[in-house]
Image: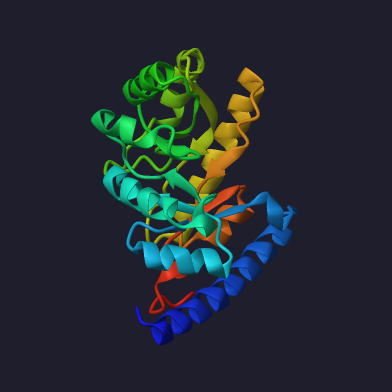
Amino acid sequence: MNEEERGTYLDFLRGRRAEILERLAAACVRSGRRADDVLLLGVSKTVGIDEVALAWEAGYRAFGENRPQELKRKLSACATSPKLADVRFDMIGNLQTNKVNMVIGNVSLIHSVSSTHLAEAISKRSVARGIRSRVLLEVNVSGEESKSGFTPDGATTALDALLSLPGIDVRGLMTMAPRDDPDAARRTFSGLRELRDALRGSHGLPLDVLSCGMSDDFESAVEEGSTLVRLGRTVFDPSYAMG
């Protein structure tokens, strides 16, 4: 981008962020929560480092990537910019066991622990590197065959074994809602919250992170208890019209 394009895009990012934060705050009011109870994660998987740098300038501090190779590329670029030294990246996409080493130690949170096998791989590699990885359990609350993750019953059954693994810290739950079905999306978000509440009661854990809500449904996710929304198009795409 040339300087004129950068200025135009930065203006868009700032204006859109203000609108998003206003809507987040209103959703928090409707659900009796504080606006700072919810983290806004800019999903940067479809944009380059220039857009991330401008988003940082616009006020964003946390980003999400779904491919380990792209995560590594952006981290390398950020390392050369002093103002981006403290940028937060999370891993939000499906993670293969052979790519775990590219992710652990480089992200604040892994959202997509979808199986005991993957949790064991993260545990083994984290212990080998002397680190502790913060993770979320991905739960397929909606039951869609196209989505990965534990079933709610499977997450309940597996939790004791997962908590016993060294090198990982289970911080909460993540889910993805059905697209283009607001009622089903809301049921998915409330189902994740209800599962979290049940696991809190049975295991005495805070499980204080609920990662759910994307560009088309983040307001209902917040109303149902989300503490972290993952927004891509609505943050970065000027052609995306917020409903």
Q: How many marks?
A: 0
**Residue at the image point whose x is 56% and y is 58% from the top:** 220
Q: Nearer the viewer, residue 92 or 193?
A: 92
Between residue 197 and residue 170, name the one nearer to us: 170
Q: Position of residue 224 (x, y in %)?
A: 60, 50
Q: Residue furthest left?
A: 98
Residue 192 percent across, percent down from the top left = 52, 40
Judged from this view, the residue extending furthest toward the bottom is 4
Relative image position of residue 239 (x, y in whole percent): 38, 79
Q: How is the image coloured?
A: rainbow
Residue 114 placement, left or right of 203? left
Compared to 63, does 158 lie above or below?
above
Is 113 situated left or right of 108 in this image?
left
Q: In the figure, is residue 69 to the left or right of 56?
A: left
Does residue 186 appear in the picture of this structure? no
Query: 109 above or below 88?
Result: above
Residue 99 visible in rendering: yes
Position of residue 158 relative to residue 91, above or below, is above
The quarter in which the N terminus is drawn is bottom left
Residue displayed at 46% across by 47% down: 89
Position above or below: 143 against 17: above
The residue that appears at 52% across and 47% down in the rendered structure is 189
**Rendered location of residue 172, percent (x, y):** 55, 34
Instruction: Name the residue rendered at 35%, 26% in the picture.
Output: 115
Residue nearest the observer in this picture, 109 or 3: 3
